[in-house]
Image (cartoon, rainbow, N blue to C red):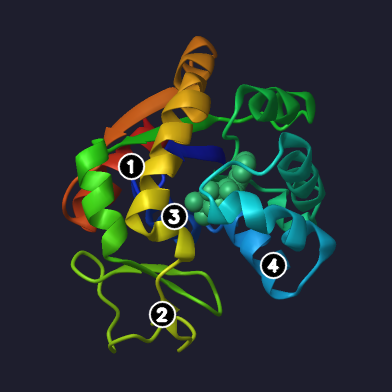
Amino acid sequence: MKLIMLGAPGAGKGTQAEILSERLSIPTISTGNIIREALKSGTEMGVRAKSYMDEGKLVPDEVVIGIIRERLAKDDCKNGFILDGFPRTIPQAEALDNMGAAIDRVIDLEVPDEKIVERMSGRRVCESCGASYHMLFKKPAADGKCDKCGGTLVQRKDDHPDTVKERLRVYHEQTEPLKAYYQKQGKLAVVEGQEAVEDTTRLTLAAVEG
Ligand code: AMP
């Protein structure tokens, strides 16, 4: 199964992608996580991406397309994958089509902007493995510690309110047109994000199977 998780930043794509990844035993590929890793290790790509990321802007298409091309060529993608945060522009979607990655379904997770701003302020991520949590909706078992690896949970710099507003503007302008793109291909399934993660998961699973 080859899936794309589409939706605004903070809509809960990452959480749903992680759950689906476990259920379907296929990897989640998050361009955001790959870029943050590159940044931590100080690679040239990471350094180049930092200024865009910090301002809530998109990293240039050729950079993320290169990341995905390399990642999809790896062995663990043979039986499928879940793309979280890619594609985010029409040229990225076209590049993906040209790679011959026959996508089965695109799950569009819909959450109103006001809710997103509220949710982002409570979001925390593990600085070691990138797993995501929420102080109200998805608490870790131990305060400030990742359930999966014990790493420290931190607030991402780009989750601060002003940057979130810019990320939403960029989403509406550059990423939202992808809904029509995949609708035309007959692959789009819309899921309304719910308050409780389990409720959203139920709808997501139905959309994947449907
Ligand atoms: P995310 O963790 O998916 O919210 O991504 C965090 C940031 O990484 C974004 O705000 C962008 O600056 C950059 N990024 C991640 N994925 C992409 C992409 N597909 N295209 C362009 N920039 C991206």
Q: Which residue is drawn at the image coordinates 50% and 57% (left, top)?
A: 21
Total labels: the figure holds 4
- Locate residue 145, reporting x and y percent: 38, 86
In this rendering, the answer to whether 46 lies above or below 130 is above
> CA separation, marks 3 and 2?
15 Å
Residue 29, compared with residue 110, is above or below; it is below
Marks 2, 1: nearer the viewer: 2
Q: Name the residue under label 4.
A: 39
Q: Nearer the viewer, mark 4 or mark 1?
A: 4
> Looking at the image, which residue is at 77% across and 28% down?
100
**Three-letter residue code for mark 2:** Leu
Mark 2 or 4: the one toward you: 4
Mark 1 crowdedness (10 Å alpha carbons): few <14, some 14-19, many ≥20? many
Q: In this view, does 84 lie to the left or right of 202?
A: right
Number of the label disc, if any, that sits on residue 14: 3
Q: Position of residue 167 (x, y in %)?
A: 44, 42
Q: Mark 1 points at which residue?
A: 204
* Label 4 SS: helix
